Image: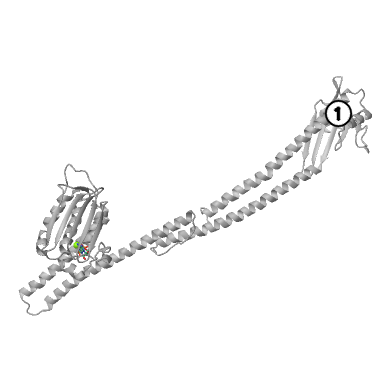
Amino acid sequence: MGINSLQFRIFAGFTLLAAVLLAVLNTYPIGLTRNQMILAKEVEMRSDFGALSAALESSTKLDYDTAGSAISILDIGRSQRVLVTDSGGRVIYDNLKTSNIIDKIVLFPEVIEALDGSDVFRCNYDAEAFNYRIACSIMKNGSIAGTVYAYEYDTESAGLLAETQSDIFNISLSVTILAALFIFTFVTTLRRRFDRVLEGVNQIGQGNYDYRIDLRSGDELGLIAEEFDRMSGQLALNESTRKQFVSDASHELRTPLASIKLLCDSIMSAKDIKVDEVREFLADISEEIDRLTRITEGLLYISRIENGRKMDGVCDLTHTVVRAGEMLRGNLAAAEVDISYDLPDDAYVYGNPDMIYQVVFNLIENAIKYNKRGGSVVIVVRPGEERMVLSVCDTGVGIHEEELERIFDRFYRVDKMRSRETRGTGLGLSIVGQCMEAIGGHIEVDSTYGQGTCFTAYFLYAPEPEEVDE
Ligand SMILES: Nc1ncnc2c1ncn2[C@@H]1O[C@H](COP(=O)(O)OP(=O)(O)O)[C@@H](O)[C@H]1O
Ligand SMILES: [Mg+2]
């Protein structure tokens, strides 16, 4: 695990935290308890031996018996060794029955300080015992007549304290080890799951769109994985659509090319061919070239829409319908189809005028093309509640229900032969659908097979522009 890895950082962070916590837990409470114990003992000893020295100050004599009786009256010194000295530091009383220092001079530092006039309390602590010492001066007639000195060697409390300390240490260490184990397992699992997500990202990066992370957990990482799987699913779909498109396009382009090749070969292999016959062949070739041109123009138009160029603008739908109708007048006559219009004076909608022309032109062209002899086409533009509505209805051949959803696909033609005869490429409705989507509208189709079809397109309203750019 690298120094930059999440795993390392979490673990290092935890170790640091645990070390600080262990250090604090193992020093602060114990130190506090120890200081409180010492303070309590100081208060106790100061009050006991302060009282003793006061009692001795008020007594007439300062000798073994006086000191002994004062101690027993005050009921102190049960756990301490108590000495009373005179002003020269000579021991005149010792509460130890087997004392051998009576009449000897004791010059403990505390005694010397008390002889100097200051009361002292000291405590030494090691792991085994508290060693308390106190010395108080005895004043008589304004001068120091002696000292009271006591000391206590307390191993019991020290033992208790040491035990508590080791208990705290053991408990905190166990908790730390348990937490470390937990964190380690957690981090390792997390790492493994991260690795799986990472592997998924890599696979997508290498173009393997079928790869699924499939983490299946409700946490944040699971959500990321789920989102990722959805994304790769979408990419896989896009990729297969793209492949399908390339294969369809090549196929569509190959057919006219094959015809051209065949026609050329026929001309070249024919002996003594007449000029009229050559013309006939050339006319066929020209038609195939027109077809190729229509397909490539359609494809170019689609790629222009996909690249998102020039979608905005304002356009008068009424004007566009009239223009497209005029362009298709020849088709009408050839198909023996009647056309009627119901249009408002103007109908301004959002969208690039050329795109909207493509929509209108393709819908009307289809309505004429897939009609019956003597049939009719009705075109209506009317302001709807939220959208401007264009409907193009015909009394033509109609479309089977199961084919309705496919007619907007590229190159899709219900009847290939008929479409070919009528110079269709199968790109018209695909362009219509994409244009409508690009300008923020949508299109619906309703058809009864054998009776007719109605396309209804919904456009966004636009305010009337000062100058319409067509
Ligand atoms: N008004 C209509 N009536 C019946 N069928 C239609 C109509 N418009 C489109 N179609 C069907 O949908 C197919 C796709 O239309 P389109 O994309 O414009 O291609 P084409 O180049 O064949 O016109 C057509 O081949 C046709 O079968
Ligand atoms: Mg068409």
Name, please, the residue furthest toward the top: 141
Circle 1 residue: 52
- Image coordinates of residue 319 in percent, x first then y, are 14, 50
Color theme of the render: one colour
Q: Is residue 371 above or below residue 92?
A: below
Name, please, the residue furthest toward the left: 275
> Horizontal placement of 437 versus 372: left or right?
right
- At x 17% / y 72%, what residue is drawn? 259
Q: Is residue 149 above or below residue 251?
A: above
Query: Is residue 355 in view from this perspective?
Result: no
Name, please, the residue furthest toward the bottom: 271
- At x 39% / y 58%, what residue is drawn? 231
- Image coordinates of residue 153 in percent, x first then y, are 82, 40
- At x 88% / y 23%, what residue is drawn? 58
| Circle 1 crowding by C-alpha within 10 Å: few under 14, some 14–19, many from 20 | many
- Image coordinates of residue 159 in percent, x first then y, are 78, 45
Which residue is at the front of the view, 62 or 342?
342
Which residue is at the front of the view, 142 or 338?
338
Q: How many marks?
A: 1
Q: Quadrant of residue 32?
A: top right
- At x 85% / y 32%, what residue is drawn? 149
- State the SS at label 1: helix
Q: Amino acid at mark 1?
A: Leu
Which residue is at the front of the view, 277 or 429?
429
Q: Is mark 1 within 8 Å of ligand 1?
A: no
Query: Is residue 242 in view from this perspective?
Result: yes
| Quadrant hosting ligand 1 | bottom left
- Image coordinates of residue 226 in percent, x first then y, are 44, 58
Q: Is residue 164 above or below residue 255?
A: above
Q: Quadrant of residue 251?
A: bottom left
